[in-house]
Amino acid sequence: MKTKTLRKNKVNVVTLGCSKNIFDSEVLMGQLRANEYEVEHESQKGDAAIVIINTCGFIENAKQESIDTILQFVDAKDQGLVEKVYVTGCLSERYKPELEKEIPEVDAWFGTRDLPRLLKTLKADYKHELIGERILTTPQHFAYLKISEGCDRPCSFCAIPLMRGKHVSTPIEQLVKQAETLAKNGTQELILIAQDSTYYGLDIYGKRNLAELMQHLAAVDGMRWIRLHYAFPSGFPEDVLDVMRDTPNICNYLDMPLQHITDNMLKSMRRGTTKQKTIDLVNKIRDKVPGITLRTTLITGYPGETEQDHEEMLRWVEDTRFDRLGVFTYSHEENTHAHTLEDNVPAEVKQARAEAVMEIQGGISYDLNQQRVGKTYDVLIDRKEGDYFIGRTEADSPEVDNEVLIAAKDNYLRIGHFTKVLVEKAEEFDLYGKVVE
Protein backbone atom coordinates (compact mmCIF):
# COMPACT_ATOMS: atom_id res chain seq x y z
CA MET A 1 0.00 0.00 0.00
CA LYS A 2 1.21 3.50 -0.84
CA THR A 3 2.53 5.18 2.31
CA LYS A 4 3.41 8.64 1.02
CA THR A 5 2.51 11.06 -1.76
CA LEU A 6 4.67 10.56 -4.84
CA ARG A 7 6.16 13.58 -6.56
CA LYS A 8 4.95 13.32 -10.15
CA ASN A 9 7.86 15.31 -11.57
CA LYS A 10 10.59 13.55 -9.59
CA VAL A 11 12.92 10.92 -11.09
CA ASN A 12 15.14 8.55 -9.12
CA VAL A 13 18.08 7.33 -11.25
CA VAL A 14 19.72 4.08 -10.10
CA THR A 15 23.13 3.18 -11.56
CA LEU A 16 24.70 -0.28 -11.72
CA GLY A 17 28.04 -1.29 -13.17
CA CYS A 18 31.10 0.64 -14.23
CA SER A 19 32.29 4.24 -14.43
CA LYS A 20 30.99 4.48 -18.01
CA ASN A 21 27.47 3.90 -16.67
CA ILE A 22 28.04 6.52 -13.96
CA PHE A 23 28.94 9.02 -16.69
CA ASP A 24 25.84 8.12 -18.72
CA SER A 25 23.57 8.52 -15.67
CA GLU A 26 25.09 11.94 -14.94
CA VAL A 27 24.38 13.09 -18.51
CA LEU A 28 20.81 11.74 -18.28
CA MET A 29 20.27 13.58 -14.99
CA GLY A 30 21.60 16.81 -16.46
CA GLN A 31 19.15 16.53 -19.35
CA LEU A 32 16.24 15.82 -16.99
CA ARG A 33 17.07 18.80 -14.79
CA ALA A 34 17.26 21.04 -17.87
CA ASN A 35 13.73 19.83 -18.65
CA GLU A 36 12.61 20.94 -15.17
CA TYR A 37 12.43 17.49 -13.66
CA GLU A 38 13.41 17.06 -10.05
CA VAL A 39 16.07 14.36 -10.17
CA GLU A 40 18.07 12.45 -7.58
CA HIS A 41 20.60 9.65 -7.79
CA GLU A 42 19.78 6.51 -5.82
CA SER A 43 17.44 8.46 -3.56
CA GLN A 44 16.39 6.84 -0.30
CA LYS A 45 13.38 9.12 0.16
CA GLY A 46 10.96 6.91 -1.75
CA ASP A 47 8.92 9.84 -3.09
CA ALA A 48 9.90 9.71 -6.79
CA ALA A 49 7.07 8.74 -9.12
CA ILE A 50 9.54 7.63 -11.80
CA VAL A 51 12.52 5.29 -11.48
CA ILE A 52 15.13 4.85 -14.22
CA ILE A 53 17.53 1.93 -13.75
CA ASN A 54 20.81 2.12 -15.69
CA THR A 55 21.86 -1.51 -15.92
CA CYS A 56 25.07 -3.48 -16.42
CA GLY A 57 25.26 -6.61 -18.58
CA PHE A 58 29.00 -7.27 -18.52
CA ILE A 59 29.30 -10.57 -16.62
CA GLU A 60 26.94 -12.96 -14.89
CA ASN A 61 27.12 -11.38 -11.42
CA ALA A 62 26.48 -7.91 -12.81
CA LYS A 63 23.53 -9.15 -14.89
CA GLN A 64 22.00 -10.79 -11.84
CA GLU A 65 22.39 -7.62 -9.77
CA SER A 66 20.67 -5.64 -12.52
CA ILE A 67 17.77 -8.10 -12.75
CA ASP A 68 17.37 -8.16 -8.95
CA THR A 69 17.24 -4.36 -8.90
CA ILE A 70 14.62 -4.25 -11.68
CA LEU A 71 12.48 -6.79 -9.82
CA GLN A 72 12.81 -4.79 -6.61
CA PHE A 73 11.38 -1.68 -8.26
CA VAL A 74 8.73 -3.63 -10.18
CA ASP A 75 7.59 -4.94 -6.79
CA ALA A 76 7.56 -1.37 -5.47
CA LYS A 77 5.43 -0.39 -8.46
CA ASP A 78 2.97 -3.19 -7.66
CA GLN A 79 2.70 -1.80 -4.14
CA GLY A 80 2.04 1.73 -5.42
CA LEU A 81 5.40 3.02 -4.16
CA VAL A 82 6.42 4.17 -7.67
CA GLU A 83 4.36 4.84 -10.77
CA LYS A 84 6.75 4.20 -13.66
CA VAL A 85 9.82 1.97 -13.99
CA TYR A 86 12.11 2.47 -16.99
CA VAL A 87 15.23 0.43 -17.73
CA THR A 88 18.22 1.54 -19.79
CA GLY A 89 21.88 0.58 -20.21
CA CYS A 90 23.82 -2.51 -21.20
CA LEU A 91 21.54 -5.28 -19.96
CA SER A 92 18.58 -3.66 -21.69
CA GLU A 93 20.58 -3.22 -24.90
CA ARG A 94 21.64 -6.84 -24.94
CA TYR A 95 18.55 -8.71 -23.76
CA LYS A 96 15.61 -6.39 -24.48
CA PRO A 97 13.36 -8.93 -26.31
CA GLU A 98 13.78 -11.57 -23.59
CA LEU A 99 13.40 -9.04 -20.75
CA GLU A 100 10.21 -7.56 -22.23
CA LYS A 101 8.66 -11.04 -22.09
CA GLU A 102 10.02 -11.95 -18.65
CA ILE A 103 9.32 -8.65 -16.86
CA PRO A 104 6.34 -7.02 -18.65
CA GLU A 105 5.70 -4.73 -15.66
CA VAL A 106 8.58 -2.49 -16.78
CA ASP A 107 7.07 0.50 -18.62
CA ALA A 108 9.76 0.76 -21.30
CA TRP A 109 13.23 -0.56 -22.15
CA PHE A 110 16.02 1.51 -23.70
CA GLY A 111 19.50 0.67 -25.05
CA THR A 112 22.85 2.32 -24.45
CA ARG A 113 22.36 4.94 -27.18
CA ASP A 114 18.67 5.62 -26.66
CA LEU A 115 18.92 8.74 -24.48
CA PRO A 116 16.88 10.94 -26.89
CA ARG A 117 14.12 8.29 -27.06
CA LEU A 118 14.11 7.90 -23.27
CA LEU A 119 13.74 11.64 -22.84
CA LYS A 120 10.96 11.77 -25.43
CA THR A 121 9.08 9.06 -23.49
CA LEU A 122 9.24 11.39 -20.47
CA LYS A 123 8.02 14.28 -22.68
CA ALA A 124 11.42 15.93 -22.32
CA ASP A 125 13.60 17.42 -25.05
CA TYR A 126 17.16 16.30 -25.77
CA LYS A 127 19.11 19.55 -25.38
CA HIS A 128 22.16 19.45 -27.67
CA GLU A 129 23.56 22.62 -26.15
CA LEU A 130 24.22 20.92 -22.81
CA ILE A 131 27.78 19.82 -23.60
CA GLY A 132 29.50 19.26 -20.29
CA GLU A 133 26.36 19.83 -18.23
CA ARG A 134 25.97 16.90 -15.89
CA ILE A 135 24.78 16.23 -12.38
CA LEU A 136 27.76 14.56 -10.75
CA THR A 137 27.10 11.46 -8.69
CA THR A 138 30.72 11.51 -7.53
CA PRO A 139 31.98 14.12 -5.07
CA GLN A 140 32.36 17.45 -6.88
CA HIS A 141 36.16 17.36 -6.77
CA PHE A 142 36.57 14.39 -9.11
CA ALA A 143 34.69 13.34 -12.23
CA TYR A 144 34.81 10.73 -14.96
CA LEU A 145 35.19 11.93 -18.54
CA LYS A 146 34.13 9.43 -21.20
CA ILE A 147 36.29 10.16 -24.23
CA SER A 148 34.74 7.58 -26.58
CA GLU A 149 31.93 5.07 -26.81
CA GLY A 150 31.98 1.48 -28.01
CA CYS A 151 34.86 -0.79 -28.99
CA ASP A 152 36.33 -2.27 -32.18
CA ARG A 153 38.50 -4.88 -30.43
CA PRO A 154 37.75 -8.57 -31.08
CA CYS A 155 38.44 -9.91 -27.56
CA SER A 156 36.84 -13.34 -27.42
CA PHE A 157 35.39 -13.09 -23.90
CA CYS A 158 33.91 -9.61 -24.10
CA ALA A 159 30.30 -8.68 -24.86
CA ILE A 160 30.85 -4.92 -24.74
CA PRO A 161 30.76 -4.44 -28.55
CA LEU A 162 27.34 -6.17 -28.50
CA MET A 163 26.07 -3.65 -25.95
CA ARG A 164 27.99 -0.49 -26.82
CA GLY A 165 28.57 -0.83 -30.55
CA LYS A 166 31.56 0.27 -32.62
CA HIS A 167 34.16 2.72 -31.37
CA VAL A 168 33.14 6.40 -31.66
CA SER A 169 35.51 9.11 -30.38
CA THR A 170 34.23 12.40 -28.97
CA PRO A 171 36.00 15.38 -30.63
CA ILE A 172 38.73 17.10 -28.61
CA GLU A 173 36.94 20.46 -28.53
CA GLN A 174 33.82 18.91 -26.98
CA LEU A 175 35.86 17.11 -24.32
CA VAL A 176 37.79 20.28 -23.48
CA LYS A 177 34.51 22.16 -23.11
CA GLN A 178 33.21 19.46 -20.77
CA ALA A 179 36.41 19.64 -18.73
CA GLU A 180 36.21 23.44 -18.51
CA THR A 181 32.63 23.24 -17.26
CA LEU A 182 33.62 20.69 -14.63
CA ALA A 183 36.63 22.76 -13.52
CA LYS A 184 34.49 25.88 -13.09
CA ASN A 185 32.24 23.86 -10.80
CA GLY A 186 35.11 22.72 -8.61
CA THR A 187 36.35 19.49 -10.21
CA GLN A 188 40.09 19.07 -9.70
CA GLU A 189 40.61 15.49 -10.85
CA LEU A 190 39.55 14.17 -14.25
CA ILE A 191 39.48 10.41 -14.82
CA LEU A 192 39.56 9.56 -18.52
CA ILE A 193 37.49 6.48 -19.36
CA ALA A 194 36.45 4.54 -22.46
CA GLN A 195 36.02 0.95 -23.51
CA ASP A 196 39.47 1.38 -25.09
CA SER A 197 41.09 4.76 -24.42
CA THR A 198 44.18 4.09 -26.57
CA TYR A 199 42.03 3.73 -29.72
CA TYR A 200 40.95 7.35 -29.25
CA GLY A 201 40.96 9.46 -32.42
CA LEU A 202 41.43 6.75 -35.05
CA ASP A 203 37.88 7.14 -36.34
CA ILE A 204 37.74 10.94 -36.53
CA TYR A 205 41.40 12.02 -36.91
CA GLY A 206 42.80 9.00 -38.76
CA LYS A 207 45.41 8.43 -36.03
CA ARG A 208 45.67 7.56 -32.35
CA ASN A 209 45.28 11.00 -30.82
CA LEU A 210 45.14 10.33 -27.08
CA ALA A 211 48.38 12.20 -26.36
CA GLU A 212 47.10 15.40 -27.99
CA LEU A 213 43.79 15.12 -26.15
CA MET A 214 45.60 14.78 -22.83
CA GLN A 215 47.70 17.87 -23.56
CA HIS A 216 44.57 19.91 -24.26
CA LEU A 217 42.86 18.68 -21.10
CA ALA A 218 45.97 19.38 -19.02
CA ALA A 219 45.76 23.02 -20.13
CA VAL A 220 42.30 23.44 -18.57
CA ASP A 221 42.62 25.94 -15.74
CA GLY A 222 42.15 24.43 -12.28
CA MET A 223 42.58 20.76 -13.23
CA ARG A 224 45.15 19.39 -10.77
CA TRP A 225 45.09 15.70 -11.73
CA ILE A 226 44.28 13.91 -14.99
CA ARG A 227 44.21 10.12 -14.74
CA LEU A 228 44.10 7.57 -17.57
CA HIS A 229 42.06 4.37 -17.40
CA TYR A 230 41.42 1.37 -19.64
CA ALA A 231 44.38 1.37 -22.02
CA PHE A 232 44.70 -1.56 -24.42
CA PRO A 233 48.18 -3.12 -24.74
CA SER A 234 48.11 -3.96 -28.46
CA GLY A 235 49.03 -0.88 -30.51
CA PHE A 236 49.64 1.19 -27.39
CA PRO A 237 50.45 4.82 -28.43
CA GLU A 238 53.80 5.44 -26.77
CA ASP A 239 53.62 9.24 -27.21
CA VAL A 240 51.12 9.12 -24.34
CA LEU A 241 54.00 8.18 -22.04
CA ASP A 242 56.04 11.23 -23.05
CA VAL A 243 53.08 13.52 -22.33
CA MET A 244 52.45 11.77 -19.02
CA ARG A 245 56.07 12.10 -17.93
CA ASP A 246 56.47 15.73 -19.01
CA THR A 247 53.13 17.21 -17.91
CA PRO A 248 52.92 17.93 -14.16
CA ASN A 249 49.14 17.61 -13.78
CA ILE A 250 48.85 14.32 -15.69
CA CYS A 251 49.16 11.57 -13.09
CA ASN A 252 51.96 9.05 -13.54
CA TYR A 253 49.27 6.37 -13.44
CA LEU A 254 48.00 3.90 -16.02
CA ASP A 255 45.18 1.37 -15.84
CA MET A 256 45.88 -1.22 -18.53
CA PRO A 257 43.87 -4.47 -18.31
CA LEU A 258 46.16 -7.27 -19.57
CA GLN A 259 43.82 -10.23 -18.79
CA HIS A 260 46.45 -13.01 -19.00
CA ILE A 261 50.08 -13.71 -19.87
CA THR A 262 50.50 -17.16 -21.47
CA ASP A 263 50.72 -17.20 -25.24
CA ASN A 264 47.98 -19.79 -25.71
CA MET A 265 45.56 -17.86 -23.47
CA LEU A 266 46.33 -14.52 -25.14
CA LYS A 267 45.84 -16.10 -28.56
CA SER A 268 42.53 -17.73 -27.61
CA MET A 269 41.38 -14.48 -26.00
CA ARG A 270 42.17 -12.66 -29.29
CA ARG A 271 44.23 -10.02 -27.51
CA GLY A 272 46.54 -9.34 -30.45
CA THR A 273 49.72 -9.68 -28.40
CA THR A 274 52.10 -12.23 -26.88
CA LYS A 275 53.74 -12.84 -23.53
CA GLN A 276 57.04 -11.32 -24.62
CA LYS A 277 55.40 -8.27 -26.22
CA THR A 278 53.45 -7.72 -23.00
CA ILE A 279 56.58 -7.95 -20.85
CA ASP A 280 58.44 -5.60 -23.21
CA LEU A 281 55.58 -3.07 -23.10
CA VAL A 282 55.44 -3.06 -19.29
CA ASN A 283 59.21 -2.54 -19.15
CA LYS A 284 59.04 0.28 -21.71
CA ILE A 285 56.25 2.02 -19.78
CA ARG A 286 58.28 1.88 -16.57
CA ASP A 287 61.44 3.05 -18.34
CA LYS A 288 59.72 6.01 -19.99
CA VAL A 289 57.77 7.10 -16.90
CA PRO A 290 59.93 6.41 -13.84
CA GLY A 291 57.84 5.75 -10.74
CA ILE A 292 54.62 5.19 -12.70
CA THR A 293 51.78 3.43 -10.88
CA LEU A 294 50.67 0.56 -13.10
CA ARG A 295 47.29 -1.07 -12.54
CA THR A 296 46.00 -4.14 -14.38
CA THR A 297 43.10 -6.59 -14.41
CA LEU A 298 43.33 -10.35 -15.01
CA ILE A 299 40.91 -13.20 -15.78
CA THR A 300 41.13 -16.65 -14.22
CA GLY A 301 39.37 -19.78 -15.47
CA TYR A 302 39.09 -18.86 -19.15
CA PRO A 303 38.16 -21.93 -21.28
CA GLY A 304 41.15 -24.21 -21.66
CA GLU A 305 43.20 -22.53 -18.93
CA THR A 306 45.43 -25.26 -17.55
CA GLU A 307 47.15 -25.50 -14.21
CA GLN A 308 50.35 -24.71 -16.10
CA ASP A 309 48.79 -21.51 -17.53
CA HIS A 310 47.73 -20.54 -14.03
CA GLU A 311 51.16 -21.20 -12.52
CA GLU A 312 52.80 -19.20 -15.30
CA MET A 313 50.49 -16.27 -14.56
CA LEU A 314 51.30 -16.47 -10.85
CA ARG A 315 55.05 -16.35 -11.55
CA TRP A 316 54.56 -13.40 -13.91
CA VAL A 317 52.49 -11.46 -11.33
CA GLU A 318 55.19 -12.16 -8.75
CA ASP A 319 57.97 -11.02 -11.09
CA THR A 320 56.20 -7.96 -12.51
CA ARG A 321 55.06 -6.52 -9.17
CA PHE A 322 52.13 -4.45 -10.39
CA ASP A 323 51.28 -1.55 -8.11
CA ARG A 324 47.57 -2.32 -8.37
CA LEU A 325 45.81 -5.44 -9.61
CA GLY A 326 42.28 -6.83 -9.77
CA VAL A 327 40.94 -10.24 -10.87
CA PHE A 328 37.72 -11.44 -12.51
CA THR A 329 36.69 -15.06 -12.77
CA TYR A 330 35.73 -15.90 -16.34
CA SER A 331 32.04 -15.50 -17.22
CA HIS A 332 30.71 -17.51 -20.20
CA GLU A 333 28.85 -14.85 -22.22
CA GLU A 334 26.40 -15.60 -25.03
CA ASN A 335 27.24 -14.43 -28.56
CA THR A 336 30.93 -13.94 -27.78
CA HIS A 337 33.59 -15.96 -29.59
CA ALA A 338 34.63 -17.65 -26.32
CA HIS A 339 31.08 -18.94 -25.91
CA THR A 340 31.84 -21.40 -28.72
CA LEU A 341 34.48 -22.94 -26.44
CA GLU A 342 33.71 -25.34 -23.62
CA ASP A 343 33.52 -23.54 -20.26
CA ASN A 344 35.59 -26.34 -18.79
CA VAL A 345 37.17 -24.79 -15.68
CA PRO A 346 34.93 -25.48 -12.66
CA ALA A 347 33.63 -22.44 -10.77
CA GLU A 348 35.47 -23.39 -7.59
CA VAL A 349 38.75 -23.70 -9.53
CA LYS A 350 38.21 -20.29 -11.15
CA GLN A 351 37.67 -18.80 -7.71
CA ALA A 352 40.64 -20.57 -6.12
CA ARG A 353 42.90 -19.34 -8.92
CA ALA A 354 41.64 -15.77 -8.48
CA GLU A 355 42.33 -15.97 -4.75
CA ALA A 356 45.83 -17.29 -5.43
CA VAL A 357 46.58 -14.30 -7.65
CA MET A 358 45.23 -11.86 -5.07
CA GLU A 359 47.22 -13.52 -2.28
CA ILE A 360 50.42 -12.80 -4.19
CA GLN A 361 49.26 -9.30 -5.04
CA GLY A 362 48.39 -8.63 -1.39
CA GLY A 363 51.99 -9.38 -0.41
CA ILE A 364 53.33 -7.17 -3.22
CA SER A 365 51.01 -4.33 -2.21
CA TYR A 366 52.09 -4.63 1.43
CA ASP A 367 55.77 -4.51 0.48
CA LEU A 368 55.29 -1.51 -1.82
CA ASN A 369 53.26 0.32 0.83
CA GLN A 370 55.98 -0.24 3.44
CA GLN A 371 58.33 1.65 1.14
CA ARG A 372 56.03 4.68 1.41
CA VAL A 373 56.31 4.95 5.18
CA GLY A 374 58.22 8.08 6.15
CA LYS A 375 57.49 9.84 2.84
CA THR A 376 55.23 12.84 2.29
CA TYR A 377 52.55 12.98 -0.41
CA ASP A 378 49.97 15.39 -1.75
CA VAL A 379 46.66 13.81 -0.77
CA LEU A 380 43.23 14.70 -2.18
CA ILE A 381 40.64 14.37 0.60
CA ASP A 382 37.59 12.41 -0.60
CA ARG A 383 35.40 12.08 2.50
CA LYS A 384 35.14 11.74 6.26
CA GLU A 385 34.23 8.29 7.52
CA GLY A 386 34.05 7.41 11.22
CA ASP A 387 37.19 8.61 12.97
CA TYR A 388 39.12 9.34 9.79
CA PHE A 389 39.40 11.69 6.86
CA ILE A 390 40.06 9.53 3.81
CA GLY A 391 41.98 10.60 0.75
CA ARG A 392 44.16 9.42 -2.11
CA THR A 393 47.60 10.05 -3.54
CA GLU A 394 48.42 10.50 -7.22
CA ALA A 395 48.95 6.72 -7.30
CA ASP A 396 45.36 5.93 -6.41
CA SER A 397 42.14 6.05 -8.40
CA PRO A 398 38.82 6.29 -6.51
CA GLU A 399 36.89 3.14 -5.58
CA VAL A 400 39.55 0.65 -6.74
CA ASP A 401 42.90 1.62 -5.18
CA ASN A 402 44.61 2.31 -1.88
CA GLU A 403 43.43 5.04 0.48
CA VAL A 404 45.13 7.31 2.98
CA LEU A 405 43.53 7.56 6.43
CA ILE A 406 44.14 10.62 8.62
CA ALA A 407 42.82 10.76 12.19
CA ALA A 408 39.95 13.26 12.41
CA LYS A 409 40.58 14.03 16.10
CA ASP A 410 43.92 15.63 15.21
CA ASN A 411 42.88 17.55 12.10
CA TYR A 412 40.07 19.41 10.40
CA LEU A 413 40.39 18.81 6.67
CA ARG A 414 38.23 20.10 3.85
CA ILE A 415 36.68 17.58 1.46
CA GLY A 416 37.95 18.10 -2.08
CA HIS A 417 41.12 19.88 -1.01
CA PHE A 418 44.73 18.79 -1.23
CA THR A 419 46.88 18.45 1.86
CA LYS A 420 50.42 17.21 2.50
CA VAL A 421 50.45 13.98 4.48
CA LEU A 422 53.38 12.12 6.05
CA VAL A 423 52.80 8.36 5.91
CA GLU A 424 53.41 6.87 9.35
CA LYS A 425 52.04 3.33 8.92
CA ALA A 426 51.09 1.06 6.04
CA GLU A 427 48.92 -2.01 5.66
CA GLU A 428 48.15 -4.20 2.66
CA PHE A 429 45.84 -1.69 0.98
CA ASP A 430 45.74 1.33 3.32
CA LEU A 431 48.14 4.03 4.41
CA TYR A 432 47.90 5.97 7.69
CA GLY A 433 49.39 9.42 8.00
CA LYS A 434 49.44 12.83 9.59
CA VAL A 435 49.14 16.30 8.12
CA VAL A 436 52.40 18.22 7.75
CA GLU A 437 52.85 21.87 6.90
Image: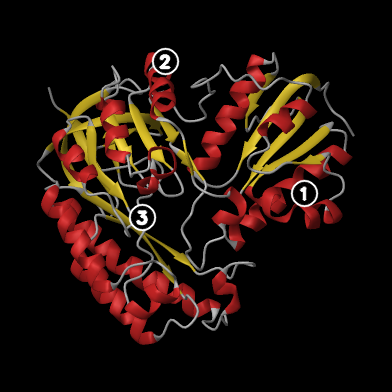
Q: Residue at x 63, y 19 (%)?
A: 127
Q: Nearer the viewer, residue 406 or 401?
A: 401
* Disc 3 to disc 2: CB gap under 8 Å: no
Question: On screen, 416 above or below 373?
Answer: above
Mark 1 lies on residue: 71
In this view, the residue farthest toward the front is: 206
Q: Residue at x 69, y 41 (%)?
A: 88
**In the image, what residue type sits under mark 1?**
Leu
Question: At which x and y percent is residue 65?
Answer: 64, 53
Which quadrant would the C terminus be assigned to in this image?
Answer: top left
Q: Indicate which disc, 1 or 3, sits on the residue closer to the N terminus.
A: 1
Question: On screen, 35 above or below 19?
Answer: above
**In the image, what residue type sits under mark 2?**
Asn
Q: Which corner quadrant of the image does residue 52 belong to?
A: top right
**In the image, what residue type sits under mark 3?**
Phe
Question: At which x and y percent is residue 164?
Answer: 58, 48
Q: Which corner quadrant of the image does residue 296 belong to?
A: bottom left
Q: Is residue 208 left or right of residue 151?
A: left
Foreground label between 1 and 2 = 2
Question: What secondary structure is found at the residue carrying circle 1?
Answer: helix
- Mark-to-mark CA distance, 1 and 3: 36 Å
Mark 3 lies on residue: 232
Mark 2 lies on residue: 185
Q: Indicate which disc, 3 or 2, sits on the residue closer to the N terminus.
A: 2
Question: What secondary structure is found at the residue carrying circle 3?
Answer: loop
Q: Is residue 354 left or right of residue 20?
A: left
Question: On screen, 381 above or below 158?
Answer: above
Foreground label between 3 and 2 = 3
Question: On screen, 317 above or below 322?
Answer: below
Q: Residues within 10 Å of mark 1 (few under 14, many from 20)?
A: some
Instruction: Mark yes or no: residue 315 visible.
Output: yes
Q: Is residue 6 left or right of residue 400?
A: right
